[in-house]
Amino acid sequence: MIVVDDLSTGSEANLRDARIQAGDRLHFIRATVSDVARTDLSEAPSRIFHLAAAVGVRRVMEQPVQSIETNVIETSAALRIAGRHEAPILIASSSEVYGKAAKLPFAEGDDVVYGPTGVVRWSYGCAKALDEWLGLAAWRAQGLPVVIARIFNTVGPRQIGRWGMVLPRFVEAALVGRALEIHGDGLQSRCFADVRDVTYALDALLGSADAAGGVFNVGSDEPITIRALAERVVRQLKSGSALVHLPYETAYGPGFEDLRARQPDLTRIRRAIGFAPRIGLDQTIADLAQAIRTGAAHGEAA
Ligand SMILES: NC(=O)c1ccc[n+]([C@@H]2O[C@H](COP(=O)([O-])OP(=O)(O)OC[C@H]3O[C@@H](n4cnc5c(N)ncnc54)[C@H](O)[C@@H]3O)[C@@H](O)[C@H]2O)c1
């Protein structure tokens, strides 16, 4: 098993459990996917999960060029590696691909709607959409088994809040009694799935012969407003933290546009692999808090 990561936002310490399970079979290469595409691998991959990306709203806003290039060029490189080895590949796409589509829930065959190119945040969804086009083109033109996973908000132990991810930001703040910063009025809603449910789904999708050439929503379909999420974190962790509202312009600069609601239609993935999320939000919050308390969330030894 080969893991490729340039550690631009990730941490090698996150592989600790995988190393315990895989032992000597796990080879870690610190490099970009493009670097690896230019070399010969020590073992031919039998299947590939392409998750490497520039992730997080804050990163997209702060490093717009690098974020677009990483998301498009590295996916193209991952597809070249898969093509060379004729290996089935899963491409991690995002619910951001739906842009600001108004019809809920979002189904895979729906039209996508973006804002103007002058608004940076839409570049992330467009780059991920281009990744999907690239993957589906390789499937059509070369017969490469490509599966697209359109992942919705995913949360869990070891996720960090530094790049704008809301749940770890809230939990980190609640644990030290700092105010939880809610962007806007907090009535925007999202559906949060636990990373352990999501990774189970990714594995099952790539293992399903019928999934090749398909696009699948992956996540939870239970919405919660960001204000309710903050209240839940404070209550569950018995924190004395206050909740404060921060205008979007203050958090992300002028011209930031957020979505009021985002919710997947899970019919397609349910039919394909019988997927249903099993880990509830309370469990995820408890495990994330535990990981932060022990330092595991920042890649430190627990
Ligand atoms: N977490 C979510 O809520 C969510 C939602 C939708 C889609 N996704 C997608 O799932 C995938 C994984 O996201 P995540 O939340 O685990 O983020 P993450 O930042 O933890 O993982 C991305 C990893 O890619 C690595 N990386 C970045 N550029 C690289 C490059 N050029 N070469 C090699 N490695 C590189 C980073 O160091 C990091 O470890 C991404 O493709 C993301 O777009 C995640």
Image (cartoon, rainbow, N blue to C red):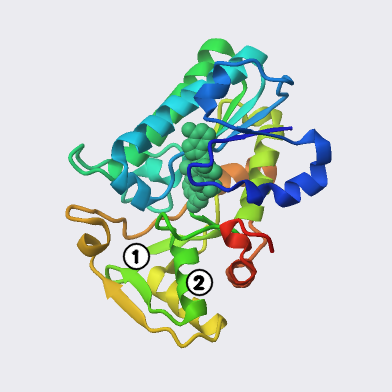
Depth-wise, is mark 1 or mark 2 nearer the camera?
2
Residue at the (68%, 42%) spot, across then down? 273
> Which residue is disc 1 drawn over?
188
Residue type of the residue flagged with mark 1: Gln
Element marked by disc 2:
helix
Q: Residue 155, image x and y in percent?
A: 55, 58
Quadrant of the image occupied by residue 288: bottom right
Quadrant of the image occupied by residue 298: bottom right
Residue at the (32%, 42%) spot, across then down? 63
Element marked by disc 1:
loop
Residue type of the residue flagged with mark 2: Val
Q: Residue 272, image x and y in percent?
A: 65, 39
Instruction: Please say whether residue 157 is visible from this viewpoint.
Output: no
Q: Which mark is residue 171?
A: 2
Number of residues whose C-alpha sits closer than 10 Å to that of mark 2, classed few (under 14), some (14–19) or many (20 or more): many
What quarter of the picture does the C terminus occupy? bottom right
Q: Which mark is residue 83?
A: none
Q: Is ligand 1 closer than 8 angstroms to the Cβ of mark 2?
A: no
User: Is 130 above or below relative to 219?
Assistant: above
Instruction: Please say whether residue 301 is visible from this viewpoint.
Output: yes
Quadrant of the image occupied by residue 299: bottom right
Left of 293 or right of it: where is 71?
Answer: left
Number of residues whose C-alpha sits closer than 10 Å to that of mark 1, classed few (under 14), some (14–19) or many (20 or more): some
